[in-house]
């Protein structure tokens, strides 16, 4: 029997309780959900849920200081875990008992640029009394190892903090499953390595010549763009797409000209399973860093393209799904120029590209019919693309805002889009936007959720002299978790992941002397945004939505786009 995530989490929590530890503080997050749900369901625990990781870590510190017993701090991966450092430092220097349970990605996602994944091994440096990197659940692991590890952790926590880094694989909330038989391994007869690496200007250029040949022989080519650094790179990529005649799918924050060959609504299209099966690429050119759209990543990883080449100037591995055949370290502009000279224009791609462009038109038409008049989270992203132009910029917070911008923002007006996608944390959103305003001309808009706003309220003080419109979508909790296939309506899920707080931001705006408007219609939103953009200082617009209704609307959009594409293109 393979240990499930739930089994592992229950094993950890039960052993902590056996050791006399019963106080838990939970900062919500999906990767840590197995631990949080196990803690909140155990009859011997007392759990507090708080939306801010830094504050919850200090809560654990305070409990340990007062009782001399460790409180367990549970948090998710990425910068969420990093927010515990100040409290861990204080606990270490004052010898305060504290146990940190941080969730983490499994080893195969480390050092691959997988989303929301940072190096959490010894994240708190030398301050913990002990650190353990607990492996993801697997059949060969002995439960006794986990229990004895917890026992020692509690013992060492008597004199200061300990850190248990717990790896979990997806699906995170799976049920116990029977172990699958493992096929007998045989030696591979392939004549080339999985991924060929080459560096422009160093050694042979044969890999690039081979790639050029594969491009010439391609029948279904596709260009995708992750994070890139400059508009010049975006122009070079677009010129290559035009030369090749291939569809181009660019991340929302990638400064690529929104012109011919641009498939804007790919996040909606690639959810159509029949379409993706029939229109799967055989060659993929991926420029820049990782992709915002998880659905696009999944589509590309399942395409089994004969050639999947990633081109970026950095040397880091960017391959969370382990599908690259070619990794080329090169300046993007130089590599595009190289291919323009090596690969002739070929009109045979016309039907392939035209089908993708027709799918894009159908997705747009369907989207407009569903969101053009009623205020919603998708319509806010859509309206921003109608309101902002090349003189404006938009900063999209992590979690749902940047995903909604990716899925629903039309790019023909081309405002510059910014996002923190290195570790994809929601902390520091307003402060980051203030820094962008200092270095970027034109008025800006920050689109963020209520939890990101609560994380960074103090940074409203930094907006005093900025031409920034803050658009906060308040759905009273973590709206992204309503998109997951789990029963959030049940109380434990709602408490741990939904995180309802019952607050709005009228008085926060008043405290920092920022004009404020609560909008309840599309017309009111557009009127307020135009007034805010014309003002000399900051402005706060609050949009209240319902998490369940928002999830239902997203599902309706996905379903209707799928139906339109099947009816028009797959009959």
Image (cartoon, grey):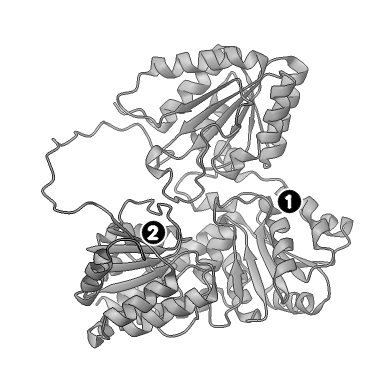
Residue 184 placement: quadrant: top left
Residue 456: assigned label: 1
The quadrant where residue 342 appears = bottom left
Q: Earlier in the sequence, mark 1 or mark 2?
A: 2
- Specify whether 515 is left or right of 376: right
Question: Camera-side residue: 194 or 109?
Answer: 194
Residue drawn at (34%, 22%) of the image: 141
The foreground one among 456 and 7 is 456
Point 71% across, 75% down: residue: 441
Residue appearing at x 40%, y 78% in the figure? 360
Residue 469: x %, y % from top left: 74, 69
Left or right of residue 552, residue 513 in this image? right
Measured from the top left, where is residue 268 in percent x and y?
Answer: 43, 68
- Which residue corresponds to mark 2? 297
Q: Give the label on residue 386, or none.
A: none
Q: Is residue 146 above or below residue 342?
A: above
The residue carrying pointer 1 sits among few (fewer than 14), some (14 to 19) or many (20 or more) residues within 10 Å by Cα, namely some
Crowding near pointer 2: few (<14 within 10 Å), some, many (20+)?
some
């Amino acid at each position: 029997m393979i240990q499930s995530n739930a089994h592992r989490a229950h094993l950890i929590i039960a052993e902590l309780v056996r050791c006399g530890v019963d106080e838990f503080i939970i900062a919500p997050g999906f990767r840590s959900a197995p631990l949080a749900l196990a803690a909140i369901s155990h009859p011997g625990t007392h759990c507090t849920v708080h939306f801010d990781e830094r504050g919850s870590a200090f809560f654990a510190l305070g409990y340990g200081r007062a009782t001399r017993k460790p409180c367990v701090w549970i948090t998710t991966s990425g910068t969420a875990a990093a927010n515990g450092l100040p409290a861990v430092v204080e606990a270490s220097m004052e010898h305060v008992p504290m146990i940190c349970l941080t969730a983490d990605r499994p080893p195969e996602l480390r050092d691959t640029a997988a989303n929301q994944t940072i190096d959490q091994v010894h994240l708190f440096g030398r301050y913990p009394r002990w650190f353990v990197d607990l492996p993801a659940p697997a059949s060969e692991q002995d439960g006794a190892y986990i229990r004895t590890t917890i026992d020692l952790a509690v013992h060492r926590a008597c004199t200061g903090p300990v850190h248990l880094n717990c790896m979990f694989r997806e699906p995170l909330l799976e049920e116990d499953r029977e172990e699958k038989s493992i096929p007998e391994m045989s030696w591979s007869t392939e004549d080339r390595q999985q991924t060929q690496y080459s560096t422009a200007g160093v050694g042979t250029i044969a890999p690039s010549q081979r790639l050029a040949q594969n491009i010439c022989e391609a029948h279904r080519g596709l260009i995708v763009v992750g994070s890139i650094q400059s508009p010049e790179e975006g122009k070079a990529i677009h010129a290559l797409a035009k030369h090749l005649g291939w569809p181009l799918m660019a991340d929302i924050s990638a400064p690529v000209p929104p012109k011919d060959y641009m498939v804007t609504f790919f996040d909606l299209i690639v959810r159509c399973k029949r379409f993706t099966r029939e229109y799967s690429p055989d060659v993929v050119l991926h420029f820049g860093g990782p992709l915002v759209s998880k659905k696009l990543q999944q589509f590309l990883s399942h395409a089994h393209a004969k050639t999947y080449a990633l081109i970026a100037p950095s040397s880091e591995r960017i391959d969370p799904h382990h599908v690259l055949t070619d990794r080329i370290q090169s300046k993007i502009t130089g590599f595009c120029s190289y291919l323009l000279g090596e690969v002739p224009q070929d009109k045979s791609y016309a039907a392939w590209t035209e089908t993708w462009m027709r799918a894009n038109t159908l997705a747009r038409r369907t989207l407009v019919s569903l969101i053009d008049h009623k205020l919603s989270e998708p319509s806010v992203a859509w309206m921003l693309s109608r309101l902002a132009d090349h003189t404006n910029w938009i900063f999209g917070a992590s979690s749902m805002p940047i995903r909604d911008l990716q899925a629903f923002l039309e790019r023909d007006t081309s405002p510059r889009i910014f996002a923190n996608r290195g570790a994809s944390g929601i902390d520091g959103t307003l402060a980051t936007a203030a820094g962008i305003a200092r270095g970027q001309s034109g008025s800006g808009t920050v689109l963020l959720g209520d939890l990101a706003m609560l994380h960074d309220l103090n940074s409203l003080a930094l907006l005093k002299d900025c031409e920034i419109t803050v658009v906060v979508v308040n759905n009273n909790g973590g709206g992204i978790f309503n998109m997951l296939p789990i029963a959030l309506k049940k109380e434990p899920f709602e408490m741990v992941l939904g995180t309802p707080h019952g607050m709005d931001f009228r008085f926060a705006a008043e405290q920092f002397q920022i004009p404020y408007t609560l909008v309840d219609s599309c017309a009111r939103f557009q009127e307020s945004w135009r007034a805010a953009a014309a003002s000399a200082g900051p402005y706060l617009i609050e949009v209240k939505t319902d998490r369940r209704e928002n999830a239902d609307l997203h599902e309706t959009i996905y379903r209707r786009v799928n139906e339109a594409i099947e009816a028009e293109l797959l009959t």
